[in-house]
Image: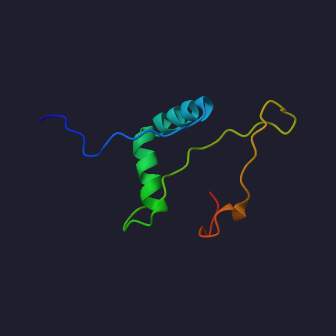
Amino acid sequence: MPNAPRSKHRSVRFSDEDWADLEMATAAQGSDRGTVLKELAAWYLRRPGAKLPKRPEVDRPAPDDSASERIDAPATANPDRSTVD
């Protein structure tokens, strides 16, 4: 059968904002959400040869810009990582 997928379709729940941001971030790097999510899962599960996907560059708001309320995770959020991107 032509165009047969190699894996089953799965459903996950994301906020609309995160899903849209993930689409923009992966597209900017020439990739797509599915590829990055599979790479992340393989890394998380410690599959042989798996590497953590490259994170996109982020434009940081100016210090007086109160439009963004996002909070960055602390460097200790993942103790297995020796460096922070």
Q: Position of residue 36 (x, y in %)?
A: 45, 46
Asked whether, in this view, residue 21 is left or right of residue 33, the answer is right
Tell me if residue 26 comes above or below residue 52 in the rendering. Answer: above
Instruction: Tell me what residue is drawn at x 55 percent, y 33 percent.
Output: 19
Tell me if residue 13 comes above or below residue 47 in the rendering. Answer: above
Location of residue 48 (image quadrant): bottom left
Q: Position of residue 49 (x, y in %)?
A: 37, 66
Location of residue 63 (image quadrant): top right
Instruction: Tell me what residue is drawn at x 68 percent, y 38 percent.
Output: 59
- Look at the image and tell me in which quarter the N terminus lies: top left
Instruction: Tell me what residue is drawn at x 58 percent, y 33 percent.
Output: 21
Instruction: Tell me what residue is drawn at x 76 percent, y 36 percent.
Output: 61
Asked whether, in this view, residue 48 is left or right of residue 40, the answer is left
Q: Position of residue 53 (x, y in %)?
A: 48, 53
Of residues 14 and 77, the one nearer the viewer is: 14
Q: Position of residue 25 (x, y in %)?
A: 53, 37
Residue lying farthest left?
1
Of residues 11 and 33, the one nearer the viewer is: 11
- Look at the image and tell me in which quarter the C terminus lies: bottom right
